[in-house]
Image (cartoon, rainbow, N blue to C red):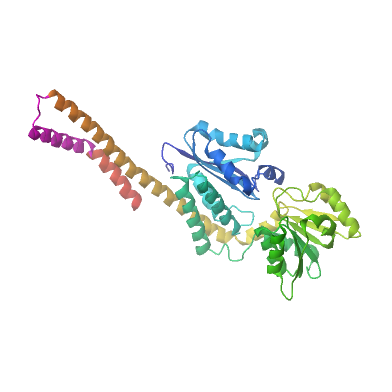
């Protein structure tokens, strides 16, 4: 199968995900949303890179580029080293690399949630769209990546529509809530503290309520967002409250379960955990950290009475969900394979049509130049009758000379359309 992009550029996707890199590596690579535009712009401005997109989530960091040559491709990896200050030797064992059709296939699988820790989870599509929006805003995507991303969104929609892969809505947040229920058997009577008031926290809160939680506290650096979330979750049967972020360490001991999703880096250190246990009179506390970078320092797990589960610990629970979705995933994979083939055909069609236009344009330039030379060699002045005869003769000759090539290209286009 030929390449999905023109012969002048190539498509490259490099990255790490939850299956190739441990959390410690992924959190070093994670690019905060506030820096995504800057990072995308820097990557797109590397010499020889024409277009670029960066996808950074809690489970993956991927760079998708359109580059001119192999040297340009190597600059994609240099970007990781320079922008994130990570040595290539630290990254290499965990990196995967896809080119051309395989890059297209991988993108379609990611957008369709077939490559997610929790297969079928819906959040990844929104995250890919967010990366695309950022890339468009900084002018990093155009003739190749822009239509490719839009195609990926259509493929994801088709997968979700034509299979039952998303019928039982699952996500990292839902797996975290399920884990909390399994730890205690029942969440009734337990107090849950959500640290962070973003989309992931909101999702986790709603799944916790489904699992039986009735008392939820929210703490966030922007207190207004915490208050808004608490108000939206509050019902006659659900009690919610807000802990000001400045008072988090003094009041977190009220919670039996603390779910963190700020991604701001180790909010809870060992000393915080020890103080919390003391206030709880050594009653155990469970941290479920779904943030990357981690919000809870690994050393907290060493404090007796503290139990820390990070996002990699959720993978085991997620795999159980994945097993139940195997049949739907197989159907979804078939759709992705078909869509990769269709995308490739569309690109080839565009390439053949472009080749015909380019061939005709080049021939016309040559013909006009030869006409000028011929007229210059004739006795002057050249009559209009002679000028028209030469124009007609050269046009007919050009058409006959190009007939075979253009016919072959049009047949190629026709075959692709069938």
Residue 240 coordinates in the image, percent (x, y): 75, 68
Q: Give the residue furthest to the bottom.
A: 236
Q: Within the image, what quadrant is residue 170 found in?
A: bottom right
Does residue 354 sit above or below 272 in this rendering? Answer: above
Residue 96 vertical placement versus 191 (above, below): above
Q: How many marks?
A: 0
Q: The N terminus appears in which quarter of the rendering?
A: top left
Q: Is residue 416 visible to us here?
A: yes
- Residue placed at 26% from the left, 41% from the top? 406
Q: Is residue 304 visible?
A: no
Q: Which residues are magenta?
A: 378-402
Asked if the magenta segment contains residue 310, the reply would be no
x 45%, y 50%: residue: 147
- In the image, taking residue 140 as reference, residue 365 lies left or right, namely left
Q: Give the x, y percent position of residue 402.
A: 23, 37
Q: Position of residue 57 (x, y in %)?
A: 63, 50
Q: Nearer the viewer, residue 188 or 1?
A: 188
Q: Main secondary structure of the magenta part?
A: helix
* 388 part of magenta stretch: yes
Residue 318, quarter of picture: bottom right
Which residue is nearer to you in this view: 135 or 314?
135
**Image x and y of residue 159, in percent:** 51, 59
Outermost front residue: 224
* Residue at image coords 45%, 45%: 142
When the figure is inspected, residue 169 is found, relative to residue 55, above or below; the finding is: below
């Amino acid at each position: 199968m030929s390449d999905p992009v023109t012969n002048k550029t190539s498509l490259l996707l490099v990255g790490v995900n939850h299956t190739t890199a441990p959390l410690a590596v992924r959190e070093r690579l994670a690019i905060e949303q506030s820096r995504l535009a800057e990072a995308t712009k820097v990557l797109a401005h590397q010499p020889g890179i024409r277009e670029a997109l960066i996808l950074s989530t809690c489970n993956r960091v991927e760079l998708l580029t359109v580059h001119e040559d192999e040297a340009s491709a190597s600059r994609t990896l240099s970007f990781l080293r320079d922008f994130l200050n990570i040595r290539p030797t630290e990254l290499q064992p965990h990196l995967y690399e896809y080119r051309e059709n395989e890059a297209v296939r991988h993108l379609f699988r990611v957008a369709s949630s077939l490559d997610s820790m929790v297969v079928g989870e819906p959040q990844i599509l929104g995250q890919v769209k967010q990366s695309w929006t950022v890339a468009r805003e900084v002018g990093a995507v155009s003739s190749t990546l822009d239509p490719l991303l839009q195609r990926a969104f259509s493929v994801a929609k088709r997968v979700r529509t034509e299979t039952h892969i998303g019928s039982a809505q699952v996500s990292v947040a839902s797996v975290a809530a399920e884990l909390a229920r399994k730890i205690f058997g029942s969440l009734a009577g337990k107090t849950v503290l959500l640290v962070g008031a973003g989309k992931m926290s909101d999702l986790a809160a709603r799944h916790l309520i489904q699992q039986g939680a009735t008392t939820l506290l929210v703490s966030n650096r922007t207190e207004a967002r915490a208050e808004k979330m608490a108000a939206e979750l509050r019902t006659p049967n659900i009690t919610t409250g807000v802990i000001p972020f400045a008072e988090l360490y003094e009041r977190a001991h009220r919670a039996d379960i603390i779910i963190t999703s700020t991604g701001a880096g180790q909010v809870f250190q060992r000393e915080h955990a020890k103080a919390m246990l003391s206030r709880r009179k050594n009653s155990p506390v469970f941290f479920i950290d779904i943030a990357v970078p981690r919000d809870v320092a690994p050393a907290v797990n060493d404090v007796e009475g503290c139990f820390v589960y990070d996002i990699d610990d959720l993978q085991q629970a997620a795999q159980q969900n994945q097993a139940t979705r195997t049949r739907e995933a197989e159907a979804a994979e078939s759709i992705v394979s078909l869509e990769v083939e269709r995308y490739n055909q569309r690109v080839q069609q565009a390439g053949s049509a472009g080749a015909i236009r380019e061939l005709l344009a080049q021939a016309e330039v040559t013909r006009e130049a030869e006409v000028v030379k011929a007229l210059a060699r004739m006795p002057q002045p050249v009559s209009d009758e002679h000028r028209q005869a030469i124009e007609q003769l050269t046009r007919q000759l050009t058409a006959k000379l190009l007939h075979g090539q253009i016919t072959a290209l049009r047949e190629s286009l026709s075959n692709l359309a069938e």
